[in-house]
Amino acid sequence: MLNLAREVMVSYAFIERNFNLLKRYLNWEILFFTYSIVNALTIGLIMVERGSSEDVLYLVIGALIWGFLSIMMREVSDAITWERWEGTIEYTFIAPIHRVTHLVGSCLFAILYGLLRTGVVLSIMPLFFGNYVDLSNSNWLTMMCVITISSLSFIGIGLMAAIFPLLSPEKGQAATGILQSILLLISGVYYEIDVLPVWLQPFSKISPATYTLRSIRAAMLDNASIASQKQNLLLLLIIGLITIPFGFYIFHQGEKYAKRVGRLKRSG
Amino acid sequence: MSSDVVVLNQVVKHFYRKKRLPRNRDLSGIQQFASSFKNYKEVVKAVDGISFQVKSGQIYGILGANGSGKSTLIRLISTLLLPDSGQVNVFGYDVVKNSYLVRQMINRVSVEAAFFKRLSAEENLVYTARLYGIPVMEARRKAEHILNKLGFDSKRMHEGMEDLSRGMQQKVAIARALLTSPMLLLLDEPTTGLDPTSKRDVQSFINDVRHQQDTVVLLTTHDMVEAEKLCDQIAIIDNGKIICEGTVKELKLLISQTEVTLEDVFIQLTGKTLSEE
Ligand SMILES: Nc1ncnc2c1ncn2[C@@H]1O[C@H](COP(=O)(O)OP(=O)(O)OP(=O)(O)O)[C@@H](O)[C@H]1O
Ligand SMILES: [Mg+2]
C-alpha cells in the first residue's frame, strides 16, 4: 500500500519548507539562538566559583538537554500553529498525503533543527567553561544513545500537543506552553526530583525527561556505560512506543473533529 | 463509469455558533455576572439538504449571496469538512470513506489565496509539487507556463508572496491548483476582488482548462456575468438550499419569457440583491 520512496520524498516537502521559512525569518532565528546560548551560559555561570566542575556541568547539561527536548516537543505543534496563522492548513490537508507522512516530515525537521540549535549552543560553551568543566570522564556514546531513544518519547508528546493548535491556534499555543513548563518543573532539569514536594514526585516518575536527564548526567559526569543505563533506556523506549502511536491516533481524532465542527477555517 | 463526476445526495452541514444572551436588566448583579458566562448555541444551517450532479466536461456554477453556503459546499466536496448526513461522491468515490483517493483527483482555489507569505511564489509552488509527488523541474516549467497564460510576469516568481498584489496572488493560487493536474477543479469565487483585466485573464483560462484538459470545474460566484459566460449548468442556492437549477437559458425562462438578465432571475428567486458586483 504505502509506497515508501514516495512517502519519503513527500515528507521532505515539510523539511524543505521549514528550512525555507527559517531563512526568511532569520531575525527570529538569531533571537532564538542568542536566547538559547545566553540561557545555557547564565545557568552554568551560577555555579562557577561557587560549586565544583561537576556542578557546573550538571546545570549546563540541564539547559542543553532541556533545550533540545523542548524543540522536539514544540516543533510539530508550532508547525500546525504556523499553518493555521497563514491559512495554508487547508491546502496541506487537501493534498493526497498520509497524515503519518506529514507528521513524520515535521518530526524529522524537529530533529534536524534541534540538533542544529543544540550543536551551536554546545560549540559556544567551551569559550566560557573551557578550563572549568572537565569532560574527561564523559561517555559520549551513552549520551548519544540516550538522546536518540528519548527523542522518541518527546516526539510522541509533541504529536499529542499538536492537536491543540489544530483545534484553536491561540489557545493551542498556550496549552503547549503550559504542558512544556509543567514538564520543566517536574522533570528535575536543574535539580534532583527529591527536592520537590512529595505529592509532586509521582508525576516526575511519569515524565520521560526525568529518565533522560538522569542517564545523560550519569554518562557525562560518571562515565556510565550503555549497559548500566539499560533500565532507564528501556523505560524511555517503552514511553516512546506508547506515546508515538497514541500521538498519531489523537492527532487523527483531532483532525476528524476539526473537520466535523469546522475548526480548520471558516471564512472564504 | 457513469458520466457523473460529482454527486451530492441530500447533503446536510450544520454549524453551531456560540451566542451570548443580551443583558437582562431584571437579574441581580451576581446573576448577571453568572449569565455572562453562559453560551447559547445557535444552529446555522449552512448546507441544508443539497443534491445535484456535475457531469463530465461541464463547468458547473453555484450562485448564491454571501453566507448562502457556497464555500461550505466546496469544503464538503474537498474533504475539508465532514457532512452531518447525506453523501458526496467524486468520480464514484465517497469523500468520507475514500478521502485519500478523492484528494488525488481534486484541487481547490479559494477566495483568499493562502500562502506562506514570506516565501516566494516559486518556493510555495515547489512545496505543493513535493506534496503531490511532482518532480520539481517539471513543476517549475508547468507553473511558469500557467502563470504566463494568466498574464503573470514570471520574473516575479522569486519575490515574497507578501510583496505581490492580490490579483497576482490569486493567479499563483490558480497555478498551484492546476500544477497538480486535477480532474476536478473546485473554484470558490476565483475572480472576486480582481480587476477587470485579471478577471478576464482568469475566466478565459478556466475556459481553456475545460477544453484542453478535460478538467471538470465546479465554480462558485456571485458574479452573474461570470456565471453566464462560463457555466453550462447553474444552481442558485440560498440559505443552504438549492432553489433552482438549470442552464442559463432555462433559468431565464423560469421567470419570464421576455429578455432578462441572470441577475433579474437571481433577485426574483431569492428576493435578494447581490453584493457589490
Ligand atoms: N467553520 C464554520 N463554523 C461556523 N459557522 C460557519 C463555518 N463556516 C461557515 N459557517 C456559517 O455557515 C454559513 C454559510 O457560510 P459559507 O461560508 O458557506 O457561505 P458563502 O456562500 O461561501 O458566503 P460568501 O459569499 O460570503 O463567501 C454562514 O452563516 C457562516 O457563518
Ligand atoms: Mg464563500
Image (cartoon, helix red, strand yellow):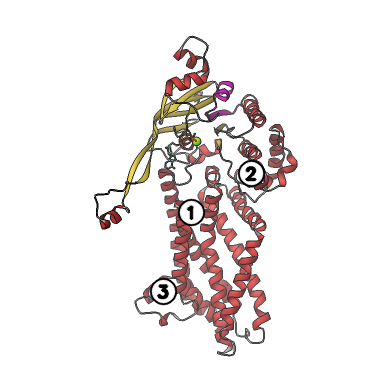
Q: Same chain for marks 3 and 1?
A: yes
Q: What's the distance in space between the residues labelled 2 and 1, CA to CA?
A: 26 Å
| Magenta highlight on residue B228 | yes
Lower sequence index among marks 3 and 1: 1
- What is the number of the mark on residue B129? 2
Amino acid at the residue labelled 1? Pro
Looking at the image, is mark 3 or mark 1 nearer the viewer? 1
Residue found at the very far top of the displayed protein:
B257
Element marked by disc 1: helix
Within 10 Å of disc 1 (Cα), the crowding (few <14, some 14-19, many 20+) is many
User: What numbered label is drawn on residue A204?
Assistant: 3
- Chain letter for mark 1: A
Classed neighbour count for the residue bearing mark 2: other residues with Cα under 10 Å, few (<14), some (14–19), many (≥20):
many
The one of A221 and B54 positioned closer to us in this rendering:
B54
Question: Which corner quadrant of the image does residue B242 belong to?
Answer: top left
Residue drawn at point x = 38 percent, y = 43 percent: B17
Is the residue marked 3 within 8 Å of ligand 1, measured from its CB? no
Residue A244 visible in this rendered orientation of the protein? no
Q: Residue at x 56, y 72 (%)?
A: A145
Q: Nearer the viewer, residue A263 or B144?
A: A263
Q: Which residues are magenta?
A: B211-230
* Residue B45 falls in image quadrant: top left
Horizontal arrangement in the rendering, residue B80 relative to residue A30 (left or right): left
Location of residue A183 with respect to B277 vertically, above or below: below
Badge 3 marks a residue whose secondary structure is helix
Report the Cα–Cα distance between label 2 and label 3. 45 Å
Residue B97 locus on image (x, y percent): 44, 39
In the displayed structure, does residue B59 sit left or right of residue B40?
A: right
CB atoms of marks 2 and 3 within 8 Å: no
In the picture, the disc for residue A169 is: 1
